[in-house]
Amino acid sequence: MEEKELTGQESLALITKMINKARRDYLDSGLSALLWGSVITFCSLVTFANYWIKQPVFDYVWFLTIAAVVPQIIIAIREAKKRKHRAYDEDIMGGIWISFGIAIFLLSYITNAYQVNEEGPLFLTLYGVPTFATGYARRFKPMIIGGLACWLLAILCHYTPLPYKILCMTAAAQLAWFIPGLILRKCYLKAKKQHV
Amino acid sequence: MFKDLNPILHSQLRLAVVSILISVKEAEFTYLREKTDATAGNLSVQINKLKEAGYIDVTKSFKDNYPQTICRITPEGIRAFEEYVKDLQTYLNIKK
């Protein structure tokens, strides 16, 4: 870019071009969504299969969600290191997902402490909140659909008998995180290829 | 025609930098260089002018043993940019 005298039209065009360049530049790598989509899908399918297998060890499969926090932290640190700019909404998004993580942990503790049998719809309702909020804020349709799907599955889960109600979790993990994660990853890799 | 427009902002590279910084919370020097296709020397000079005018804040640090320069727009920079756009619209007779 060289220094030259700008006309009014050129100034406005330059402002619009630069604002659009900066706005379009935010691209999620999709790794976090893929991680959580995979972990929840795996845990729910193991729980579903264990209804027939009846292996006590598989009752602890959901502890994998605690273990998954480690790769999540690594992903977050690596992405923050790579980033050359910070968007205004990044702190808001971070706050939403951290509060979701805390809420999920508390809900697990409370449903366990009170021996709640119908915890599925509660978790699904909570899954929908950050997913829908992220999709809505970033204008990313797959996550808006994923968030809405979580809430519909919460209702469906209430009327579904055991052990099939656990499959609502599988469907939610796929629709809210895994599929949007795949789409994000594809866009991210495509954009990265174009920049090389 | 444009002598009344803010001369600090009425320059191609400085206007490009401020337009980017108004859209993001903060940006590294390398990011600004990528987006504006400017040379490092020229960009550095223009960033200094914006800093001297109080329109941007510049923080220098180290990241993985490499120097890192982070720029962010100041409230004064936001006001100046909004004023500049308003003046431009007046000149071009654009009604909101």
Image (spheres, rainbow, N blue to C red):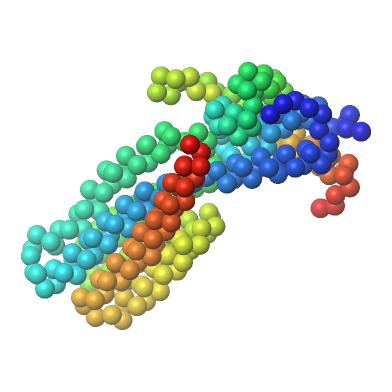
Residue A7 x/y as whole percent: 84, 36
Residue A173 picture quarter: bottom left
Report whether A179 appears left or right of B59: left
Q: Please say if B76 is above or below A36.
A: above
Left or right: where A177 falls relative to A116: right
Residue B44 visible in the current orientation: no
Residue B48 locus on image (x, y percent): 66, 20
Q: Is residue A104 above or below residue B24?
A: below
Q: Quadrant of residue B88?
A: top right
For the residue pair A126 and B67, the one nearer the viewer reads as B67
**Residue A79 image point, x, y percent:** 41, 39
Residue drawn at x 20%, y 75% as measured from the top left:
A163
Q: Look at the image and tell me in which quarter the N terminus of chain A lies.
A: top right
Image point 14% across, 72% down: which residue?
Answer: A51
Q: Image check: A84 left or right of A127?
A: right
Q: Position of residue A40 (x, y in %)?
A: 28, 60
Q: Quadrant of residue B62?
A: top left
B11 left or right, relative to A39: right
